[in-house]
Image (cartoon, coloured by chain):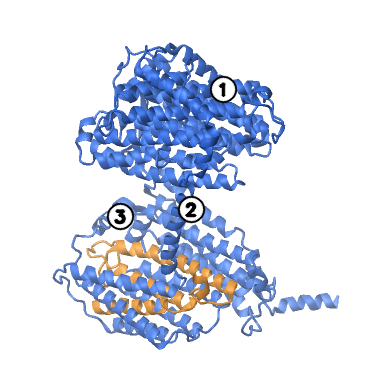
Amino acid sequence: MEILVASAIGILTAAGIYLVLRLRTFPVILGISLLTYAVNVFLFASGRLAVGAPPILRDGVEVYADPLPQALVLTAIVISFGMTAVVVMIGLGAFLGSDTDRVDDPAEDAS
Amino acid sequence: MSLFLIVALPFLGALLPGLMNSAGRAACAGVTFVVTLAAFVGLMTNLPAVAAGEVVSVGVDWIPIVGLNFNLMLDGLGFFFATLILGIGLLIITYARHYLAREDHMGEFFTYLLLFQGAMVGIVLSDNILLLLIFWELTSLSSFLLIGYWKHLPEGRQGARMALTVTGMGGLALIGGMLILGNIAGSYDLSVILQSKDVIQDSPLYLPALILILLGCFTKSAQFPFHFWLPHAMAAPTPVSAYLHSATMVKAGIFLMARLWPVLSGTPEWFVIVTTAGLITMCLGAVIALFKHDLKALLAFSTVSHLGLITMLLGTGTKFGAWAAVFHIFNHATFKAALFMSAGIVDHEAKTRDIRLLGGLRVLMPITFVIATLAALSMAGIPFLNGFLSKEMMLEEANHTTLFGMPWLVPVLATFGSLFSAAYCFRLIGHTFLGPVRESYPAKPHDPGFGLWGPPAILVVLVVAVGVAPFLATPMVQLVASAVVGEAGAFDDKYIKIWHGLVPALYMSIIAVVGGLVVLAMFKPLLRAWDAAPRPEAKTIFEALISGVVALAQGISHTLHNGAFSRYAAIAMITFIAVGYHAWQTGTVGEASRVIQEAGPVAIAGWLLLVAATIGLVLMHRRRLLALVLIGIVGLMVSVGFVYFSAPDLAMTQFTVEVVTIILLLLALNFLPKQTPVESSLSRRLRDGGVAILGGVATLILSYHYLIRDAVTGPISEFHLANSYKGGGGTNVVNVILVDFRGFDTFGEIIVLGIAALLIYALTETLLNGPVRARLLNRRPDQARAGDVHPMMMVVLTRVIMPVVLMVGFYIFLRGHNEPGGGFIAGLIVSIAVVMQYMASGFNWASDRVRFPYHGVIGAGVLVAGLTGIGSWFVGKPFLTSDFTYVRIPPFQEFELATAALFDVGVFLAVVGAVMLSLESFSRLARRAHDKDSDHPMDIDPSREDDAQAVKGA
């Protein structure tokens, strides 16, 4: 089970990195989203994996999943929505303003 | 009056001139005057205590953990400087009221002036050196504003920038020096530091601290080699020059040297550095001043020269030196401020300050002539004026000072400096006021009104009074000099006298005055020689230095920052991997301590789906719509994973966020190209693939190692589990952490979310109001529109479902404290319900029915959460302390009421507002671009057609 989660994080990260390195805004945004999944799952996994032990207190139950990473990741998910929205807006604005969705500045602007 | 109030008054008063601006110039100046007067009177109420030798002090802890306390103290030295600052301030305000032209913005000027005044008073009353540093920087900033007050003049802007650069750099050095000093002494409080002379001087860090502190003092007080900024600061309006650059700010460095004199002086290092810098500055300034044709430039260099004189006196480290320095600070402030104001009067009336164009003003401006002449003669060191007394003391002290083993060096240089000092004073009088009346002044000069000549006249009265009757100033100098050397009553038996007998100092004085006259007689040939001699121009050097640094910085940043995002991203990724690898190599890994869990078929199936979708996404990312579908699957599988691994709250959040994210991306994709073209070369793709695989493998290994081991130290989660019900009143520990244990974090997060949404809104507004607007209006949809954009089935269905979804949201919200759910998730669910209405019935129809603007919803959410937190103050608890109770209202069962639920309402509102504002902004762009959206919910509406036919039939 651990190797499944670890490999999922690894594959999400690899795919995220590859897409972030693309040259157009849309794949970069997708890549950032994949990295967000990877990071969130990674943080979540820092509480270690527990099956069938949700952190909802019940009488007579002693073992619970670690609630703290869950709480932190919950807000991270919502915040990353806000950040994705901002990045999408910036990408969209740049496209509407310049009619191109390349992420790299043209070479003549670079100097 | 409390010292706090004295320091605070100018700052508080700084608000007034701006407000009074429309009430007229007199009101503006008047309110500034009254504020300053109040502070001055307040200061004077402390006079009896200070005169009795007491040190008045008040203090509160500000940030005690770093030793920064808001401690103020008032001793003789502080009192003396505060009196100068506020007293001369009063005169300057009167003068400025009449000096500034009609088109100058009065409120702005007096606001800056009061800010500066407050900062200066703060410096001289600070008992804590960190506090002093804050005020020190404030003077640099406020003087920057004042020097550049005439924004239309390039010299003003350049001078302001140069002053800020030089004093700002000095300020940085000073911070370093003060921190070292405070570290050596073990406290940042001056009262402690001043008692630690031996510890400080024995410390190996004494010399670095001394050099850094002196850098701060020398830059501020324009000592060689940092003297060059002061003349350029003369582009400021004359009241500023008179106030900042003669009486107050440039004395801040002197003040600090005097303040720290008891602990820093007396060592060979102090003596050599300070005395040498002072001597060079004194001579250099005096010589340059003689050859300046601009009255203010002449006075600026003479100020540099006199500051050098005072620095040299402090450098000798003897008590007599301190005594003479204090007296000269006072004398210089009086005659120099008077001279600056006189120069301003000449400029104001004759419309020029060029000495070569002036002369003969004695007849035209007799009052100004008397004032300026008395002040200039005092500066030249003529008997029966106060400058003579302190200059004699300086020469006396110079006679007893041996520098570099040469006993003649200091006296000769001191006499040389005095000689040129006398020469430029005579030139000022002779070439401006004496001589024949000219016909060629740019304007016809005449004496101004009392408002302009009154303030300098008052100062000149002091100049003469002290010069004739030095016993008037004796008690003050005794008091202040004792404070400088840090021994109460050290000078009680010392008196200022005019006649000392035929001592060497007298002969030196005579040589200086006679020599000054001789130099003036030979002025023309000297000037020719001066103009012919090559001289380094400080401004050119400074500008070259600055442009060199700028070029270097640009070279670096343009190379690194060439606009290619993909390159930065690649460099960042490779760096992360490399740093991670280094950490991995150097860290230690313990034994695997957890039992590996068996993976069931469900888990493997989920994993396969996730991996397939991810790989498919990479392979097919060029088809963007398909990519969205695939990323939706990824998100879904992540949500399922959360369910599987006992995180129901996360799953619900991820799932709902997924929905709104996909809608958002669809809205964006509406405009963006639907395909990504192939652009990167194969080698580049291989490189990126290599980096990606490296990164993926690294995270895989890291996560795996992490998952098969227990944490090195036990996590703090046990506390949350144990206290969730007892302390937070909820059984859903995740929710209790969010709204209670870590409520402050959540509070910050909803604010961030709100800011993100507002940012999106602002960007949309900017786009819609910019050139993009026209482009959007002319844009043709790049794919065919559906004939029935808002189908009736969907409209009806979403309306039926709306109350149900709201109910679910409400339910999820309420159960949140004890079961999976809560404000975040409920907010997302309700947002989806509202979004459905937009999608089904159209933007116009839906937004007409929204009663509250989404900004307001965000604001209300943050406000509710914040007020819930503040509410706990009223019961004497810290911010966001929660409480709960159980109530029973028949016919319901017993239920819980918790303040945390109120906080969760805030979270809920903020989430709804933020999500809706973001999505609405995107749709507004779309609405601008396409055909007009109908006001009706359905494109094909049978009932409406009936209406239309009914109308037609009737």
Q: Which tint is chain A? A: orange
Q: Nearer the viewer, mark 1 or mark 3?
A: 1
- On the same chain, marks 1 and 3? The answer is yes
Which mark is first along the chain, 3 or 1?
Answer: 1
Kind of residue at disc 1:
Thr
What residue appears at the point 32 percent right and 74 percent down from the top-left corner?
Answer: B574
Q: CA distance from mark 1 to mark 2?
A: 67 Å
Identify the residue shown where x is 21% and y is 80%: B598
Query: Which tag is nearer the camera, tag 1 or tag 2?
Result: 1
The amino acid sitting under disc 2 is Val
Q: Which residue is mark 2?
A: B862
Task: Say which residue label 3 marks.
Answer: B725
Towards the viewer: B415 or B758: B415
Q: Which residue matches tag 1?
A: B373
What mark, if any, has residue B97 been given in the picture? none
- Image position, residue B465 (x, y; %): 50, 14
Q: Are marks 1 and 2 in contact (CB under 8 Å)?
A: no
Query: Quick one: label 1, few (<14), some, or many (20+) residues within 10 Å?
Result: many
